[in-house]
Image (cartoon, rainbow, N blue to C red):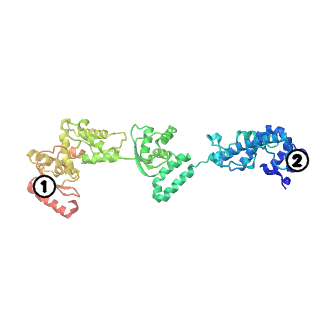
Amino acid sequence: MADDLDWNAIISPAGDGGRRRAGDDAGPGADRPLSRREARAREAARADAAQAGAAQTGAAQADARRADATRADAATAEHDRAQAARAGADRAQAGRAEAERAPADPGGFAVDRDEPVTRRDRSRPVSPADAPVATSADELHPEVTALLTGEHVVPAEDASRAAAARGGEGRGGGGRASRRGRDPRPPRRRGPLIAGLVIVAIVLAGGVAGYQFIAPKVQQVVAAITGAQESDDYSGDGTGKVTITIRQGDIGEDVAKTLQRSDVVKSSKVFYKLLLQSPDVQFQPGSYTLKKEMSSKAALAALQDPANAVKASIVIPEGTALADIEAGMVSKAGLTKAEVTAAAKDVSAYGLPANATTLEGWLFPATYPINPGWTAKQYFQSMVDTMKEHLASAGVAEEDQERVIVFASLVQKEAGLAADYPKVARVFQNRLDDGMALQSDATVAYGTGNTHRVTTTDAERNDASNKYNTYVHKGLPPAPISNPGDVAIKAVTNMAKGKWLFFVTVNLETGETVFSDTFAEHQVAVAKFQAWLRAHPDYQ
C-alpha cells in the first residue's frame, strides 16, 4: 500500500501548484501523479544537482511552513526557516551518499547510516525556547510586524523570488514564488475614539452638570487630538446689551481691545484684521450700545450705525452739591470713583482764588457732553472755567469771586421762586449788616453731610462743632454749600431793596415765601408753615 501513495503530494505544502512545479522537467505525462519509486528514481538521477539546489529547496520548504504557521508566532516561524534550511542540506547530503553507494532502496527513504533524518527533524522545534530571539525590528517576522504596526512588509528574499516568478525565471522544481505583499495600511486615528470615551465617562460620572462644567476643557482636548481648530470669532449679531466707550485718540487697535474686554468680540486680532481690510472706516469718540458675543463683522457694522451712539451728557442742576456731581461723572463719563475723587481734592490745579478750599460752588450748573478722551480733571476744569465766565458776565471782580460764590450758594439752597432770590439775598445781607446770625437751616444740613434737605433738628441747630452751623457761628459759612446758577449769582450782585430780617416758605409745593421785618411777624408766618406741614406729613 505504501508504494501506491503519492508521497510527493503529501510532503509538498504547495498543493497542486507545487506538484506542477515539481514535475516541470518530467516531460510528457507530467500531470500524472508520480509513484514512490518514480519519485525516488528521479531524486537519484538529480543527485548531482542536489547540492546546488539544496539551499534553495530548504528555503522553499521554510517559506511553505511559514505560510501555514500562525502569523502571531514570529519566533517559531524564524526557527522553522533555519531548521528547514538545515534539513534541506541534510537531505541533499543523504541523497549524494545514497547515489554513490547503491541504487534507490525500494523499501523506504534514502538515509545516511550515521545521522538518520526523521520526520521530527522536518517538523517544528521541540520547545519554543529553542526559537531564535529577535534583537531588532528588522529581525521580526513580517507577519508579526504587520500585527504590531498595521503595515505588511515583504522580506527582501521573498520579494526577489516573487519578482523572479513573475518574470518566468523559476529555478529547479522546488522553488515557489512568495506571496505578494499587501499595501501598507494607513495609520488609524484613535483620537476621536479616545475623546468620545472621555466624554461618555464624564457624563456617566457627573451627569449633565458635570459635563457642562468640564465640556469646555474636553472640547479643547478633542480639538488638540483631532486637529480641529476652534473659531477665533463669534457668529451672529450677539445677545444682551453692553455699552462701550471709544476715547479721543483711540486707534483701531485700541478699539479692538476695548471690544474684546467687553466680550463684544471674541478676539481683538480678528477684529483688527477686519479693520485693516476696511481702510475707509473711521470711529467717532463716544459711547455706543452694542451686544455681547457679536461677530467681528457685525460689531464693526454696529459701530458705524449712528443709531447705536449714546447721546450721554453730565447734567448739573442749580444747587447740586459736589458729591452728586462726582457720582454723575462716574456713571455718565465712565470714569472711576478714585480718579474723580483725586481730581476733586487737587483744588490748586484749577486756578481758583487763594482762599478757595474746595471745588464746591465753582462747578457751574449746566449740561456737559461726554468726551471719551477727557480725564476727570478736564471735566472739572471745564466746569470751573464756565463758572468764571458767568461770574465775569455778572460783573464780579476776581477778588470778590469767592465771597459771591459762597453767598450765592446759600441763596440757591434757601430760595424757592426765582422772583424771591433777590429778597432772600437782601435778608441775609441785612442780618450780616446788623451783626445777626444768619440762622440758615441749609448750612446746618450741609455741615451734617446731608445735601438733599434744608430742614434740621433742634440738636443739629445747637451743635457748635458743625462749622457750617450758622445758628451758632455768625457770618457766612466757611465755604460754598452748593453750586449756584446765574439767578443766584445775579441775586447777590443785584439784591432787592427792603428791611426784611426774616423769611419762611409756607408752602413747599408752590414755593410761597413770607418775608417779615420783625420777629413777631415772622412767628405768625412760621405757624402757618407748621400747619402746612401737618397737612402734608410726607414732607416731614
Question: Is 208 left, or right, of 30 in this rendering?
Answer: left
Residue at far front of view: 114
Inspect the image, locate mark 2, and give the three-letter code of the amino acid beneath it: Ala
Viewer-nearest residue: 60 or 497: 60
Viewer-nearest residue: 167 or 263: 167
Q: Which label was assigned to residue 290?
A: none
Mark 1 is surrounded, within 10 Å at the Cα level, by few (under 14), some (14 to 19) or many (20 or more) other residues, namely few
- Inspect this view and state whether residue 168 appears: no
Mark 1 — residue?
459
Residue 5 horizontal/vertical position (percent): 84, 53
Query: How far is mark 1 from mark 2, CA to CA?
Result: 138 Å
Residue 38 horizontal/vertical position (percent): 87, 47
* Quarter of the image where the N terminus is located: bottom right
Query: Which residue is pictured at 61% across the width and 48% down the height?
Result: 188
Viewer-nearest residue: 136 or 434: 136
Inspect the image, locate mark 1, and give the three-letter code of the amino acid beneath it: Ala
Residue 539's quadrant in the figure? bottom left
Mark 2 — residue?
30
**SS of the residue at dot 1?**
helix
